[in-house]
Amino acid sequence: MSPEAPGADNAPLLVLDGVTKSFGAVAALRGVHLALHPGEAHALVGENGAGKSTLVKTLAGAHTPDTGRMALDGRPLELRGPADARAAGIAVIYQEPTLFPDLSVAENIFMGRQPLRGLRRIDTTAMNRDAERLFERLGVRIDPTRPARGLSIADQQLVEIAKALSFDARILVMDEPTAALSGVEVERLFGVARSLCERGAAVLFISHRFDEVFDLCQRITVLRDGAWVSTDRTADLTVDEVVRRMVGRDVSSLYPKQDAPVRGTLLEVSGLSRAGVFSDVSFTVRGGEIVALAGLVGAGRSEVARAVFGVDRYDAGEVRVAGRPLPPGSPRRAIAAGLALVPEDRRQQGLVMELSVERNATLARRRALSRLGLLIGGAERAEAQRWTRRLQVKASRLTAPVGTLSGGNQQKVVLAKWLATEPRILIIDEPTRGIDVGTKAEVHRLLSELANEGLAILMISSELPEVLGMADRVLVMHEGRVVRELSRAEADETSVMLAATGQGATA
Amino acid sequence: MAHDSLYAAPSSSSAETERRTGRLTGLRGVLGSWDVAVVVALVVAALLAGVSVESFATGRNVQFLLLDLVPLAMLALPMTLIVITGEIDLSVASTVGLCSTVMGQLWLSSGLSLELICVLVVLLGAVLGAVNGVFVTGFGLPSLAVTIGTLALYRGLSFVVLGDQAVADFPASWTAAAVRDIPGTSIPVAVLPVLLLALVFGVVLHATAAGRALYAMGNNDQAATFAGVSVARTKFWLFVASGAVCGLVGIFWTLRYASARGDNATGLELTVVTAVLLGGVSIFGGRGGLLGVVAGVLLLGVLRNALQLADVDANALTIVTGALLVASVVLPNAVADVRARLHRRRQRANPVAP
């Protein structure tokens, strides 16, 4: 397979050839090819976890590739840090730029490179004038002397682009820049991107929105599971074809859920809204059922789970557990009502890394385990032993800090911690993120078993095969709303992916 | 962070874990030996003092030493719990001072019985602690800043209450009770309630659900919240408890010296924090135990007492306390860093196959 797109008509500015990058046992990039041509906008698409962000970080100099070559203008390029990337003329615009809020726009642009006058004083006049010229080139009006605080995200991105121009960046990487922008702002950003292309810059555009990809870009590269799938001219592609390439893989390798008798409704969420995060989310989960909450990262799935569990507040709506309303904002009451939440971020939310396996496994049960208010006589040890044995946690000893375990075993400890509370409803956010294949299958088997025992399971997952293999029903979220509910029969890669990207969203 | 991928998360954090577990095994090693080291230091200091300082090993000095230790030991108990949650209360000495002057003022002018006044003073302490608690948990301010503020505020108020005068005419039966010995020994009766309180705090910290929650939130308050711990509420009540203990200490201090003054217990917070950190509690929260702290309190008490007997002046005492404070923060971290570095070097030497 050639990294060159068919019919490349000019020499590429930047070429990546066979770039790989692994983190521990996880291969994030597996032989990725990419060629960015001057004057072109190039789209990079793929599912969550396809390796887009790793690629962006590699271009930004934050990751060094394990193998593979990069070349700029035909000369080998090595990026050892963000400073190298900048020197090579590569600028990355993130979805949410990080400006210094209390400094002026011009100071943000020229941070560390301020024009100086006598006695090394900063020449504010020259700095503001230069900033103004940059904005003129971009054709936008932002006052260089105003503080960055209070700028809209769209304007913050333009400040970042101005900064990129100020050090003559020729390669502009835009990582989901439009996720938080309104229609008008997107148009303005695209105007800027097009005019940069006309002046010979190369733009790498990452987005989940196909209409934007097809509107802006001349070429589309598809990544899947860290590997390069294809690069084609946009004119030769259709949305359906791109989606097929993004998801096309073997589903049968996953452990499928067994059919369990469906019981009464255990979790009932109605009209749940939180301003700017999700709105009017309603669904039910019955005992014996696994309901998957699918969608792209940022669609608001984890936020819904956190609100249901009481970690976050919500503005409107109601949560009922087995018919009884659950008061908002209290994980403790949620636990008492029989809810359990295995959170998305194991290290920050799921476990206290410094504490022992046994303390972590019994943390949510600490009250129930105490007798006369006291936790003595090895009650915790016995409970931890019971659950770590059932889940086959591999730890040298139960008193070892949980941070010394492998990712898969850590996830098992989180599961043990929540199963020990004997929940009726299990909300599990990214059940198999970052764990090895063997443990993955174990987790899937366990979830199936639990459903069989009558638990209601709400599973959030960004891995389509997992969703399709495990779920009885699939709820698809897009930009804070549940846009589609699919039965097991209706759900396939294309229907879920289309709904998740907001295509053909008929709720 | 909407663009973080499946792979982005393990990337940054695997390095982080390596660093932390490196530090962690280091810290574990240090803490295991830290407790022992403090106890050994205590024994050595006591033996040295007994041999070289003439009047150290006398019944009368033991009595004084223990009386001096009562306020320090009592204040160190809630402080231990607070520091384990990752917070700190620097206002304790000023709270003691304010409680003492209010006690004096009430005795002087209110005509209430001393029993009732004592109850009111403990309540006052609890309220002063609650003020700290509200600022720290309600407004989410750093406890270091809040309690430095109330350190000055409460001390200022205690001078407002009594000016620069002292109230000294407390009933002799009360002031004598504060320094009385257990019959037949040279151990003050006041030690008994301290032991009881230490037992209560020790049990709460080491053998209850609340104690487990304290360690969890000191290490990672987010994970604690997800496990159903009410982080803010727990911290609030710890500050209230700290204030109430300050009230008790205020009463003891006033009766022991038969004097309610605005400058009572000035600077004691330094000694309390030193004792807690010397006892092996991590200033970053999440680590340490009450036995270590008891050893730390005793060691500090013996050192100060012996130096006082050897006619070392007060400034030198402060220098010793300060140096111990810095050492007990720096040493565990320095040792842990060295161990983490060695650990990393070992890992580099034996790279794991990809």
Image: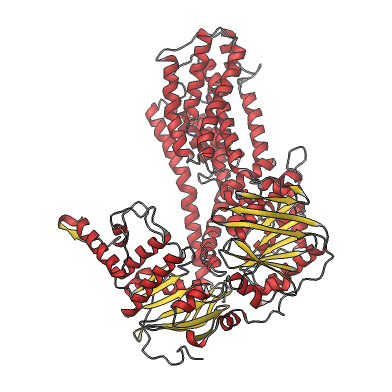
Considering depth in this image, is A385 or A21 the residue closer to the camera? A21
Q: Name the residue at 71% across, 79% down.
A: A253
Residue at 80 percent of width and 71 percent of height: A258
- Residue B246 in view: no
Of residues B20 and A22, the one drawn nearer to the viewer in this rendering:
A22
Image coords of residue B249 (percent x, y) = 55, 23
B190 sits to left or right of A139: right
Who is closer to the viewer here, A125 or B10? A125
Q: Quadrant of the C terminus of chain A?
A: bottom right
Q: Residue at x 67, y 51 (%)?
A: A359
Quarter assignment of residue B242: top right
Q: Residue A358, how many percent across, how many down?
A: 69, 53
Work out which residue is located at the far right of the displayed protein and give it: A261
Q: How is the image coloured?
A: secondary structure
Q: Percent x, y for residue B234?
A: 61, 39
- Counting the numbered discs, the total is 0
Residue A259, by quadrant, is bottom right
